[in-house]
């Protein structure tokens, strides 16, 4: 072996060490196949620059995105469900009043809302859908949560704790019929609009009229119990039909005819009426 050949072999060995080459087996003719020397430092199976590597689940399902966290779904119950239903009602996707139960109409409403905005139509209220819904709506008021009544009665005003009292809460939109601090019955009530507000304070029933008709508005006021001028507690068929989407002309409307019929039979002239927030 000449000195030149020796030097060439030594140089090749140094190059192999630097580039990380490995020994290759010879072929059937005793020749060594061509050697690929990678000097980039990248793994042999690396993707071309700019090509993202997908997980196996992504490769098998196209461009599927990770599912958002589900907050509420079919069968869930509670105040938070009632709130999301009220928001769906605000944007006219849920026509029925909030019930507090994530029922079939709610599922359909959520699917419609999701589809309109390019979200997966799961019918479940996930975190992404909830964020979009909140941005488009306002925090519902109590009357929106209970548009047809059913709101829990507020704590009685201290002025209601003695005697025979019609204890009327504007905050919870409820009436308690109380005798000596004990609640005999409860019912949903509705009040006047901002232009015809129901007066607040302490009053007394001064006149009862079972089949009364308003002389001003010419509308029926069954089971009327007058307590302040022309304002009375009475049954309202409009309240029964439209709930809190309507208002009275200042009277305290009751929507349950059966309950006010019993109340009318028990209340006497002179009984106290307390209207408070």
Image: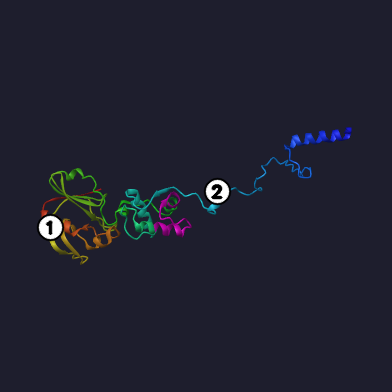
Return the residue at label 1.
Answer: 207
Q: Judge from the rendering whether residue 44 lies leftward or rightward of residue 116; answer left or right.
A: right
* Residue at screen point 43% across, 50% down: 126
Structural distance between the alpha carbons of marks 2 and 1: 79 Å
Residue nearest the observer in this picture, 99 or 54: 54
For the record, the magenta segment spans 109-129
Q: 10 Å neighbourhood of mark 2: few (<14), some, or many (≥20)?
A: few
Question: Is residue 119 shown in magenta?
Answer: yes
Return the residue at label 2.
Answer: 56
Residue 10: horizontal and vertical position, in percent?
A: 82, 33
Q: Quadrant of residue 191?
A: bottom left
Residue 121: horizontal and vertical position, in percent?
A: 44, 57
* Residue at screen point 42% across, 58% down: 113
Q: Judge from the rendering whether residue 242 lies leftward or rightward of residue 17; answer left or right.
A: left
Q: Judge from the rendering whether residue 270 lies leftward or rightward of residue 27; answer left or right.
A: left
Q: Quadrant of residue 260?
A: bottom left
């Amino acid at each position: 072996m000449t000195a030149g050949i020796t030097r060439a072999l030594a140089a090749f060995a140094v190059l192999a060490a630097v580039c990380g080459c490995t020994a290759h087996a010879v072929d059937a003719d005793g020749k060594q196949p061509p050697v690929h020397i990678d000097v980039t430092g990248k793994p042999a199976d690396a993707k071309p620059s700019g090509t993202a590597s997908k997980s196996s689940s992504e490769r098998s399902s196209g461009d599927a995105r990770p599912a958002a966290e589900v907050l509420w779904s079919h069968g869930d119950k509670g105040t938070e469900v009632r709130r999301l239903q009220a928001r769906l009602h605000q944007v006219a996707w849920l026509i029925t009043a909030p019930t507090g139960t994530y029922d079939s109409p709610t599922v359909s409403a959520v699917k419609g809302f999701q589809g309109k905005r390019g979200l997966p139509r799961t019918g479940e209220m996930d975190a992404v859908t909830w964020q979009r819904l909140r941005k488009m709506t306002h925090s519902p008021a109590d009357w929106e949560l209970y548009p047809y009544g059913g709101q829990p009665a507020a704590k009685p005003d201290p002025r209601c704790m003695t005697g025979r009292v019609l204890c009327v809460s504007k905050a919870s939109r409820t009436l308690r019929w109380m005798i000596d601090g004990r609640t005999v019955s409860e019912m949903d009530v509705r009040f006047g609009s901002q232009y015809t507000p129901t007066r607040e304070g302490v009053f007394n029933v001064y006149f009862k009229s079972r089949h009364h008709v308003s002389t001003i508005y010419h509308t029926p006021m069954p089971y009327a119990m007058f307590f302040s001028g022309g304002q009375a507690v009475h049954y309202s068929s409009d309240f029964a039909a439209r709930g809190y989407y309507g208002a009275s002309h200042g009277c305290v409307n009751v929507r349950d005819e059966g309950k006010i019929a019993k109340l009318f039979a028990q209340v006497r002239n002179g009984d106290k009426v307390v209207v408070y927030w």
